[in-house]
Image (cartoon, rainbow, N blue to C red):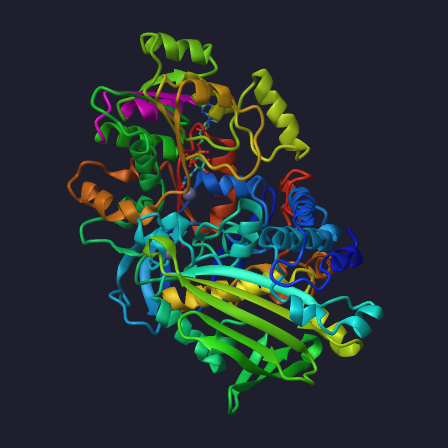
Amino acid sequence: MNSNGIQRGMGGARGVDIADIERLGLTAIGGMLTGYLLTRKAWGARALAMVGGSMLYRGICGHWPMHEFLHADQEPESARGIDGGIEMHAVVTIRSPLSDVYNRWCDMAAFPQFMKYLESVEVLSDGKSRWTAKAPLGTTLSWTAEITHAEPNQLIAWQSVHDAMVANAGEVRFEEAAGGRGTTVHVRMAYRAPFGSVGVLLAKLLGENPSHHLNEDMKRLKQLMETGEVPTVEGQPHGRQAIPPGEERPDLERRYGWHERDKVEEASWESFPASDPPAHW
Amino acid sequence: MKALCWYGAGDVRVENVPDPTILNPRDVIVEVTATAICGSDLHIYNGYIPTMRKGDILGHEFAGVVVEVGSKDMKLKRGDNVVVPFAIACGNCFFCERNMWSLCDNSNPNAAMAEAVYGYSSAGLFGYSHLFGGYAGGQAQYVRVPYGDVGPLKIPAGITDKQALFLSDIFPTGYMAAENCNIQPGDTVAVWGCGPVGQFAIRSAFLQGAERVIAIDHYTERLHMAEQGGAETINYEDADLLDLIKECTGGIGPDACIDAVGMEAHGASVPALYDYAKQKVRFESDRPNVLRQAIQACRKGGTVSIPGVYTGFIDKVPFGAAFSKGLTLKTGQTHVHRYMERLLQNIVDGAIDPSFVITHNLKLDDAASGYATFNEQKGECIKVVMTP
Ligand SMILES: NC(=O)c1ccc[n+]([C@@H]2O[C@H](COP(=O)([O-])OP(=O)(O)OC[C@H]3O[C@@H](n4cnc5c(N)ncnc54)[C@H](O)[C@@H]3O)[C@@H](O)[C@H]2O)c1
Ligand SMILES: [Zn+2]
Ligand SMILES: [Zn+2]
């Protein structure tokens, strides 16, 4: 189950890049891991559940979408223990026509409307754009990306330019949903952070479950397109000013990471049986 | 403004909190003129709803006057008198479009949390934990209502707030519980629980053509109110309930059974005590005593309709009985928007006056004692309505 073993199995093949037998094995183990961990309140085990998830995903799909990006030139970094990078994927079905959804994706400058941790996207010339993301402690991370491939109403793929501080690549696929239910959007992204402080910031920004944030972003896009707004409860009244300081649970930051929106103090969380809450929360 | 806030099991207080403001273009602010305590609020009060946060404002049954309207064009204007559905729904998504409003895809800002627990997220709800969006509730002087262009229903002149108030929840809930039974002429419907939801289920079953309704509870006053609604009643403490139901349905069983009790069912049978023990130590989140009985009692090929709220995991549900008898199970939060106009018409026509269920009229300032009374003196206290 260690990642070196998995990488060796990928040995240079193209297309379906892992052997069938290994794929079956990965799917089974990944499924078991994910299934098991999703039924437990094992906060510390979330990372493991993710490993399980990506094994399952890879087992089913046979082919790792960001494989080339992540592993083509990894040697020096993996030797230092960074090991590939951070992958995420999300899927959402939006009740809007295909061309509307595709056009929305072409309007990159508007991405911060639904990508929560993005501060700005500045569209440059010749298919390039400058991305700035919010990072903890008021810092930002930025990089330049270029569109590598675009097929109207089908696909947009991008990659960071050669010497970007945060190397990343991604692709969005659009298809008409079955039954006339709108447009299905599949997003896959991968980041590879350099060693050192930028890498630490990036890891913090993405948290323990990077796909979670991508999923949230996709949900916001759907909400915006379907209802014209993103639902929120930030800024509404509550009676917490009446709580004496110190009664707030001290372990919140640790349990939920630094993200504001995750900071639900589940004062009555214990009303779920000990083994029930899924690993994500 | 004043608002009833939750601080822990058995601990609710009226506090001074900031007034709500418009946060989104489709929001409206309603000045509350009447608000009620629901049996669902008691699940929170008793500490059985997870993801509550200290200081959360409760309340999902309210009527009032629109005092502010968001930037989006909408029919509502300041001064309109409205009653607001407890489920928050966008009106645009696949589910809203199909009339399944309480399953709205877009209204829960904490959808990810609900997805982790339930697979997919249902609609946001007023004052009903962060799992359902963390929206501030309406047991307050003012409340922010999202999607003001689709939710609130105007109360026509001649209908009082207290008559219209229960269109927000319990009347549609009882009505949908009955509708889920697919009642045919001549049918007998058994209703567990003679709380407000049970009372409206009884009356709705008759409105939908049931021939007999058998109502089950153990508080004389509640059973009496059920009789006034036309039901035959059983005090489950007096008899072997399942035998008695079989007996009084000529050995056939009820065509449909409604569980209007939910996760905090009382009982002294062996499985019920087992549930108490497990729920106490949190090995089981819900006590499904009534659900078990309803499945067991239902006639072959019948329907078990479950408006009573469940949140988590239940043990020893006789699924073999459900399977062997080919039962249909129907459940879920009420699609309030689906029923409001239709049921308002029933009120206007004089077919029903929902205020029959009110036993206590209080000021919002006394909300904490209202909770305690409704929770502990269920005999005399059937429905509490408060005015700010
Ligand atoms: N589905 C929805 O959208 C929706 C909406 C509103 C309320 N509810 C739920 O409906 C249920 C009832 O609400 P309510 O306001 O009427 O509450 P309530 O607490 O006033 O009434 C519950 C009644 O059930 C009775 N009861 C308890 N154990 C029983 C048993 N073993 N057999 C028979 N009766 C028993 C109690 O004596 C009480 O009269 C609650 O679970 C509430 O959360 C659901
Ligand atoms: Zn309710
Ligand atoms: Zn909706």
- Residue name at image x 50 percent, y 60 percent: A91
Q: Residue furthest right?
A: A80
**The one of B302 and B139 positioned closer to us in this rendering:** B302
- Residues A272 and B61: in front is A272
Question: Which portion, as a residue range, is magenta?
Answer: B208-228
Q: Position of residue A83 (x, y in %)?
A: 77, 66
Identity of the residue drawn at 27% across and 58% down? B81
Verify whether residue B211 appears in magenta: yes
Residue A241 visible (yes or no): no
Camera sees residue B360 = yes
- Foreground: B183 or B175? B183
Looking at the image, residue A43 lies above or below residue B196: below
When the figure is inspected, residue A148 is found, relative to residue B119, above or below; the finding is below
Q: Residue at x 65, y 47 (%)?
A: A27
Residue B80 image-quadrant placement: bottom left
Q: Position of residue B57 (x, y in %)?
A: 51, 55
